[in-house]
């Protein structure tokens, strides 16, 4: 009977359900959206998004070269801030390169293939 009462107490708790050890819980959404899982990225998410190594991402965080949030030992990245930050690294093609590429592409499309 003691176990039934304990189970009933757990069912009434508000929040995340109990997770086994070693399983990370989803972050709750706050009113400010600072912990929203939809817009926040973890290190593995950023590694996949940017196609960088983990050590490179950690170095960039340590040097404050990339916008991030540190909550205790947890590091999070805002998806919109990362997109904005990436814009500074965009290098548009030179107009001569574009013209050259268009010429090559137009020649390839008109030449018969063997």
Image (cartoon, grey):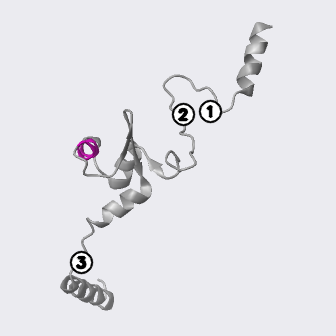
Q: Residues within 10 Å of mark 3 (few under 14, many from 20)?
A: few
Residues drawn in magenta = 56-62
Measured along the vertical axis of the image, is residue 98 above or below residue 26?
below
Which quadrant, please, contains the C terminus? bottom left
Q: Is residue 60 magenta?
A: yes
For image coordinates 27% across by 68% down, the residue present is 90
Res 54 quadrant in image: top left
Q: Residues within 10 Å of mark 1 (few under 14, many from 20)?
A: few
Q: Nearer the viewer, mark 3 or mark 2?
A: 2
Res 28 quadrant in image: top right
**Residue 31 image point, x, y percent:** 58, 48
Name the side, left or right, on which 19 lies relative to 63: right
Q: Which residue is mark 3?
A: 93
Q: Which residue is mark 1?
A: 16
Q: Which mark is residue 89?
A: none
**Residue 13 image point, x, y percent:** 70, 27
Q: Which mark is residue 25?
A: 2
The answer to which of 80 and 30 lies nearer the viewer is 30
**Residue 4 image point, x, y percent:** 78, 13
* Total numbered circles: 3
For image coordinates 50% across by 32% down, the residue present is 24
Name the side, left or right, on which 94 lies relative to 40: left
Mark pair 3, 2: CA separation: 44 Å
For image coordinates 32% across by 60% down, the residue present is 85
For image coordinates 24% across by 45% down, the residue present is 56
Q: Looking at the image, is mark 1 or mark 2 earlier in the sequence? A: 1
Q: Looking at the image, is mark 3 or mark 1 earlier in the sequence? A: 1
* SS class, disc 1: loop
């Amino acid at each position: 009977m003691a176990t039934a009462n304990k189970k009933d107490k757990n069912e009434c708790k508000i929040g995340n359900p109990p997770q086994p050890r070693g399983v990370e819980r989803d972050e709750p959404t706050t009113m400010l959206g600072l912990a929203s899982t939809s817009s926040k990225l973890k290190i593995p998410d950023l590694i996949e998004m940017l196609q960088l190594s983990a050590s490179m991402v950690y170095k960039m965080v340590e040097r404050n070269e990339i916008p991030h949030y540190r909550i205790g030992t947890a590091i999070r990245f805002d998806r919109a801030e990362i997109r904005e930050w990436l814009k500074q690294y965009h290098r548009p093609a030179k107009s001569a390169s574009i013209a050259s590429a268009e010429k090559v592409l137009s020649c390839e499309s008109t030449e018969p293939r063997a």
